[in-house]
Image (tube, coloured by chain):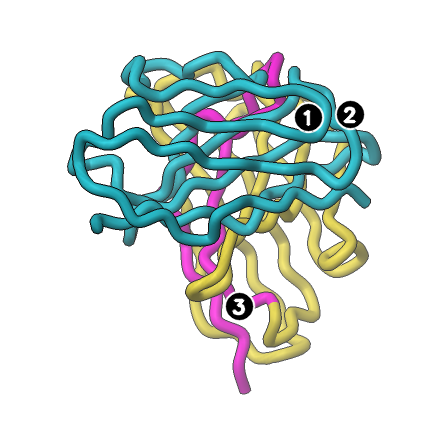
Amino acid sequence: EIVLTQSPGTLSLSPGERATLSCRASQSVSSSYLAWYQQKPGQAPRLLIYGASNRATGIPDRFSGSGSGTDFTLTISRLEPEDFAVYYCQRYGSSPTWTFGQGTKVEIK
Amino acid sequence: EVQLVESGGGLVKPGGSLRLSCAASGFTFSSYGMSWVRQAPGKGLEWVSFISESRTYIYYADSVKGRFTISRDNAKSSLYLQMNSPRAEDTALYYCARVHYRAYAFDIWGQGTMVTVSS
């Protein structure tokens, strides 16, 4: 079973700063099936990135995804007040199954 | 507007049963695979089950296999989750989610329905 480990657990930053979130897989995964979500308190998750680097519909270009193999990154170029939230990576794989990372909380410093 | 609306959650006793529903609108429901994803209070996301567009493929997480049954009615644009023999650890907010046809990511989510398993 492939495990996704996100780091850091919490990221404390100020608006305007750059956020770099990591998602590491215990085995190589297909970048075609690696996604990122944003979840704000009391809300459903929202798809940000699919296929490791493709922004979903309506997602601002300050959000970008990169990576391959076992290491993937979500970057928020300049944090806006509405970006403070929890972020999850997720992969689709054989079995088939869908697996989520444990999440990274981006909080206001 | 593309929308998913879940219903049917509530309090259920361990060993009982509960049926969740998800009503879809604003898109061609029969063209998309659908899933249930849950989130225990204060915890992360856990995929529960998937059903393909024409019900050909159905998959479950090991944690619910043999107890939960996913189904769909394309004529009614509805998705269901039959929860049998629920356990305390099944207590969670259950989301209905549309599966992106190419990336197998969850591109549309409902607002969730809360299930509490307790005696």
Identify residue for label 1: B52
Q: Label 2 crowding class (10 Å Cα cut-off): few <14, some 14-19, many 20+?
A: few
Q: Return the x and y of residue A61 as percentages of the image width and height.
A: 31, 13
Q: Label 1 crowding class (10 Å Cα cut-off): few <14, some 14-19, many 20+?
A: some
Hey, what amino acid is under mark 1? Answer: Ser
Q: Is residue A61 above or below residue B8?
A: above
Of all residues shown, which one is farthest toward the bottom? B119
Establish whether labels 2 and 3 are both on one chain. Answer: yes
Query: Could you tell me which secondary element the residue under label 2 belongs to?
Result: loop
Magenta range: B90-119
Q: Which chain is yellow?
A: B
Apparent side of residue B38 relative to residue A60 in the rendered image (left or right): right
Hey, what amino acid is under mark 2? Answer: Thr
Q: Earlier in the sequence, mark 2 or mark 3?
A: 2
Q: Return the x and y of residue A51 as percentages of the image width and height.
A: 58, 16
Residue B13 shows in the view: yes
Which residue occupies 42% across, 64% down? Answer: B42
Q: Which chain is cyan?
A: A
Report if the CB atoms under discs 2 and 1 are less than 8 Å apart: yes
Which residue occupies 83% across, 35% down? Answer: A95
Identify residue for label 2: B56
